[in-house]
Image (tube, rainbow, N blue to C red):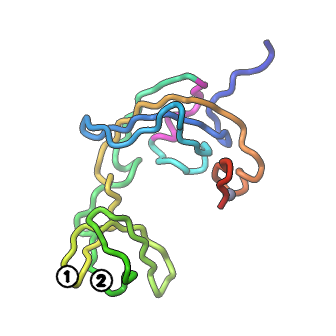
Amino acid sequence: MSEKEPKVTDDMVVSMAYVLEVDGEEIDRADEDDPMLFLQGHGNIIPGLESELYDMGVGDSKEVTVQPADAYGELDPENRDQIPRDILPPDYEPMIGDPLELRDTETGEVFQVYVADLDDENVIVDFNHPLAGETLNFQVKIVDLRPAQSEELAHGHVHTHGHHH
Ligand code: ZN
């Protein structure tokens, strides 16, 4: 037939099943019947994985090992800060590991941080991603591929049913 088999290229919407292991332990997965969707070439996923997917076709599998620098960065143990509990919403009870968004009141910049420790008055927040410093082992399988729509390209992300932002 004349139709060319689609391959992973920039601006393709990729449906991907994966298993993510760190130190031999599974920490995340998406199965083939509920794959992760993302727009290739737009930094939707970590760079060390995105770069390994080019030219894969539907049904192809691959094992990909990603070093910290190409994943969630090196771990910087100094990169912590203490914030008073009373700047958090009063109805929020922080738990270790919770993600928080902090806004720098001077620059307006928003930081994603994680609750590392707690006492009665303060929360120690960690600016490192929980997977910083970790080598990630992915087993990936391409489940589906389609060209992105122009609106998706303009936004730089995939639009799924009933979900637009
Ligand atoms: Zn959008």
Q: Position of residue 126 (x, y in %)?
A: 29, 68
What type is the residue that disc 2 sits on? Arg
**Dot 2 and dot 1 residues touching (CB under 8 Å):** yes
**Which residue is located at x 49 percent, y 83 percent?**
107
Of 12 and 26, the residue lying toward us: 26
- The range drawn in magenta is 49-58
| 52 within the magenta span | yes
The kind of secondary structure element at disc 1 is loop
The kind of secondary structure element at disc 2 is helix
Q: Residue furthest top?
A: 1
Q: Is residue 139 left or right of residue 126?
A: right
* Tally of marks: 2
**Which residue is located at x 35 percent, y 36 percent?**
137
Query: Which quadrant of the rendered structure holds the N terminus?
Result: top right
Quickly name the residue at label 1.
Answer: 120
| 48 within the magenta span | no
Q: Residue furthest right?
A: 2
Q: Position of residue 46 (x, y in %)?
A: 47, 48
Quadrant in the picture for residue 21: top left
Quickly name the residue at label 2.
Answer: 85
Q: Position of residue 161 (x, y in %)?
A: 68, 48
Q: Residues within 10 Å of mark 2 (few under 14, many from 20)?
A: some
What type is the residue that disc 1 sits on? Asp
